[in-house]
Image (cartoon, rainbow, N blue to C red):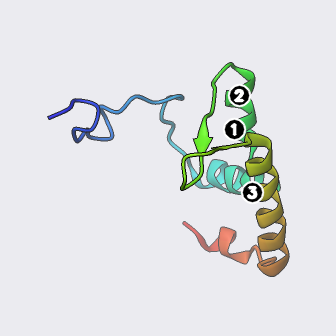
Amino acid sequence: MNTDTAFKSFKDKKRFNALIVLDHKKFKKAYLDYRADPNKGTRQMMASGVIYRVTDASGNPVDMNKIMKDREKKQIESNKKNNNLLEVDLLK
């Protein structure tokens, strides 16, 4: 069995950032930040030197900027469609 594809528990997986514990206030801030900018984490990782190589179903490389623009466009559409943020206050 290849060790790269072998099952690893969440505790044993390699992470880019350390796990953090969120209380309700921090979760709400993270949720609202993601709604405002879904590419924030991706931009931070790319700025730190992480190289993304994304391919489509046929194996052709896809431009990361195009993916990020599409993600932002989808998030804006989703925000317009679901603009009721009451559910954030109901999560506890």
Amino acid marked by disc 2: Met
Residue neighbourhood size for the residue with mark 3, other residues' Cα within 10 Å, grouped as few (<14), some (14–19), many (≥20): some
Residue wearing tag 1:
42
Whether tag 1 and tag 3 are in contact, CB under 8 A, the answer is: no
Q: In the displayed structure, does residue 89 sit left or right of residue 66?
A: left
Residue wearing tag 2:
46
* Residue 50 badge: none
Residue neighbourhood size for the residue with mark 2, other residues' Cα within 10 Å, grouped as few (<14), some (14–19), many (≥20): few
Amino acid marked by disc 3: Arg
Q: Rounded to the nearest whole Å, what is the CA distance between mark 2 and mark 1?
A: 6 Å
Image spot of residue 73 (x, y percent): 83, 62
Quadrant for the N terminus in the image: top left
Please identify the quarter of the rendering in which residue 63 is found: top right
Location of residue 70 with respect to 78 vertically, above or below: above
Whether tag 3 and tag 2 are in contact, CB under 8 A, the answer is: no
* Residue 71 badge: 3
Q: Rounded to the nearest whole Å, what is the CA distance between mark 3 and mark 2?
A: 16 Å
Please identify the quarter of the rendering in which residue 45 is found: top right
